[in-house]
Image (cartoon, rainbow, N blue to C red):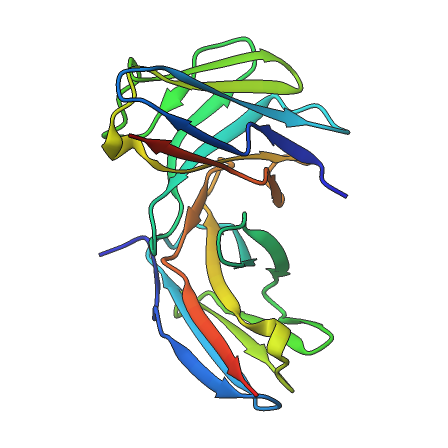
Amino acid sequence: RKEVEQDPGPFNVPEGATVAFNCTYSNSASQSFFWYRQDCRKEPKLLMSVYSSGNEDGRFTAQLNRASQYISLLIRDSKLSDSATYLCVVIGFGNEKLTFGTGTRLTIIP
Amino acid sequence: GAVVSQHPSWVICKSGTSVKIECRSLDFQATTMFWYRQFPKQSLMLMATSNEGSKATYEQGVEKDKFLINHASLTLSTLTVTSAHPEDSSFYICSAPKVPLETQYFGPGTRLLVL
């Protein structure tokens, strides 16, 4: 089983729609969680951290369920500029190494 | 603005040559930096952890004699791909945490093409 698993997609979603991604992780001792965004042929960029209580940043909402070991990302009122690959990232306990999911490709359709 | 830089941004070289990639933290000191490799349509795979003042820690399956890492200062880590071959062609990215156990900032990456 992979340490961090995501549905690779692709998700093709009309502009203005709401889209949700899930991610599961295998190590119950994982301590930090993030969503990164990666555009084609570019480096990953931090979208948001994920906190146990859930957190929101504009149109983006992240949730963490430690009991079920999954993380979610919700994008509301999607824009064309949201088209990218979204990477679920986990940091294990006691270290700084990032473990990446395979990424979910999102395309927003006009 | 960018907080981690990489140089060069792209390299084309002949098989058998060695290629050095630099990763710099621009406005903070990084005792630890990470090197990743990403093949087309795949996720980032951690290759090694670069530690200032000590040896790098390599992930399983990564040849330390082929991918030489030197963390020369608190703001610079270098990755040298020795005797590069076409299968080493990839996107190499470094990252560094500003604050331990918190988010990491990625360099813009280096595209390596070995002919």
Eyeballing the image, is B69 above or below A32? above
- Left or right for B19, reference B115: right
Q: Quadrant of the N terminus of chain A?
A: bottom left
Q: How many numbered tags mark residues here?
A: 0
Residue A67 in view in this figure: no
**Residue B106 in view in this figure:** yes
- Residue shown at 43% from the left, 73% from the top: A22
Residue B82: name its quadrant. Answer: top left
Query: In the image shown, does B50 or A10 lie closer to the viewer?
Result: A10
Q: Is residue B111 left or right of residue B7?
A: left
Q: Residue at x 28, y 30 (%)?
A: B115
* Quadrant assignment, res B75: top right
Q: Residue A38 placed where, x, y %?
A: 52, 57
In the depicted structure, whether residue B14 falls above or below residue A43 = above
The relative height of residue B20 versus residue A25 in the rendered view (above or below) is above
Kindly identify the residue that appears in the image at 55 percent across and 57 percent down.
A34
